[in-house]
Image (cartoon, grey):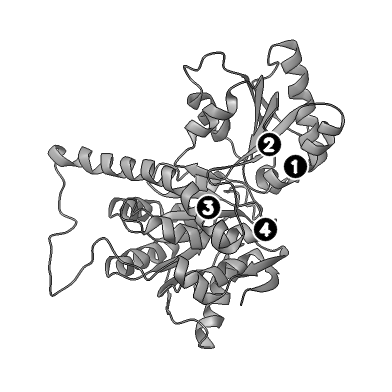
Amino acid sequence: MARVVIEMGNYIASYAAKAARVKVVAAYPITPQTQIVERIAELVERGEMDAEYVCVESEHSAMVACIAAAALGVRTFTATSAHGLTLMHEALHWAAGSRLPIVMAVVNRAMGPGWNIWPDFSDSLSQRDTGWIQFYCADSQEIFDTIIQAYKLCEDKRVLLPAMVCFEGFVLSHTSMPVTIPDQGDIDEFLPPYDPGWTLDVDNPLSHATITPPEWYMEFRYLIQEAMENAKRLIPIVDEEYRRMFGFKHGGLIERYRCEDADLILMTMGVMGSEAKLAVDRLRNDGLNVGLARVRVFRPFPKEEIKGLAEGVRMIATVDRHTSFGMEGFLATEVKASLYGSKNPPLIAGFIAGLGGRDVTFHDIESMMRKAWDWMEEGKVEKEVEWVNLRW
């Protein structure tokens, strides 16, 4: 029978790993992720989770341990944040290039210096080109559901890629919310035992990790790109299958809110997508036809869905909890690239907000949308990139 628990987002991620029947967990602490692997340690110690718990000496070692275990044909899990994720960088490429369906919780934290333990997306978005699927969650129910869905997706033979399930530190990791955890038998029906695409087996040896010359390297990279395209097609299908079994659906690639007749659509990621719904409702009450599109999956990027959303829309305003120094927010850049060549594309304005955990309220989002609405009415964007609530 399904049960409702009220726990912090970190603990919910731990329960999802348990429910997925993960067999190897590689653990190394870092704020604000540490509680995930601590709770898993408790579950293993009490005999409530049947898994090998491996304490390693660094985050790089944590990923290497997951790679080794996945190569032996078992379901693996780990979690990290910020500098821990960037320490894994080399191994992230290795996991994706080896086509291993590892799932990792990334509790987003700003990068130093100056040292900061609060959230923005600079840690995970700096890893966008490693070949990992990237999900961004807006609440704790989505954390649980997405970890389960990620294993289902990544272990599909048409995909066989690793995935990050990202959620903002403290805002979600240390906030308690009610979450429905389905019956274990139902989860097992949705997520059957791991059937690996390949394994290291002493009884059936194979040549592995040898030099790949130019004659073949490009083809292997093409296959990763093809797998990403397959994932883009399968993510909405997996999300809908989960809804039919458990009643929760999170929008597939993009969660849409009041977009059907919108003249202006705000696009953002993570918890700002939840906060923005209040701003949309307030502006609708004032007669402004605005909508929200929360980008749930950043890799593979949902460019076809964005093209569809842009049809008939006069303006798109993006809000990034990240900046790519020397350019703008990643989301703003990717939206513009997705709409390149479109007939009558909408105006696009980019806002950067919430870096290093700076609070972004629905009042702030409403202010951004009103400013974008004025630019839309004038027919031109006054500032292509605007940093919100700077202290000077």
Q: Earlier in the sequence, mark 4 or mark 3?
A: 4
Q: Is residue 33 left or right of residue 368?
A: left
Observer-nearest of 126 and 100: 100
Observer-nearest of 117 and 129: 129
Q: Earlier in the sequence, mark 2 or mark 1?
A: 1
Residue 277: mark in rendering = 1
Give the secondary structure at mark 1: helix
Foreground tag (4 vs 3): 3
Observer-nearest of 383 and 228: 228
Query: Dot 2 surroundings within 10 Å: few (below 14), some, or many (20 or more)?
Result: many
Tell me the kind of residue under disc 2.
Leu
Q: Earlier in the sequence, mark 2 or mark 3?
A: 3
Q: Where is 201 relative to 287, above or below?
A: below
Q: Earlier in the sequence, mark 1 or mark 3?
A: 3
Q: Position of residue 256 (x, y in %)?
A: 64, 39
Give the secondary structure at mark 2: strand
Residue drawn at x 52%, y 14% as measured from the top left:
343
Assess whether mark 3 and mark 1 are in contact (beta carbons under 8 angstroms). Answer: no
Q: Position of residue 276 (x, y in %)?
A: 74, 41
Q: Where is 251 relative to 50, above or below?
A: above
| Distance in Å between CA atoms under marks 1 and 4 | 17 Å
Asked whether the viewer can see residue 170, the reply is yes
| Distance in Å between CA atoms under marks 2 and 3 | 20 Å
| Distance in Å between CA atoms under marks 1 and 3 | 22 Å
| Distance in Å between CA atoms under marks 4 and 2 | 20 Å
Tell me the kind of residue under disc 4.
Leu
Q: Position of residue 111 (x, y in %)?
A: 57, 48
Q: Would you name the residue on which mark 2 appears?
A: 292
Residue 38: mark in rendering = none
Q: Would you name the residue on which mark 3 appears?
A: 240
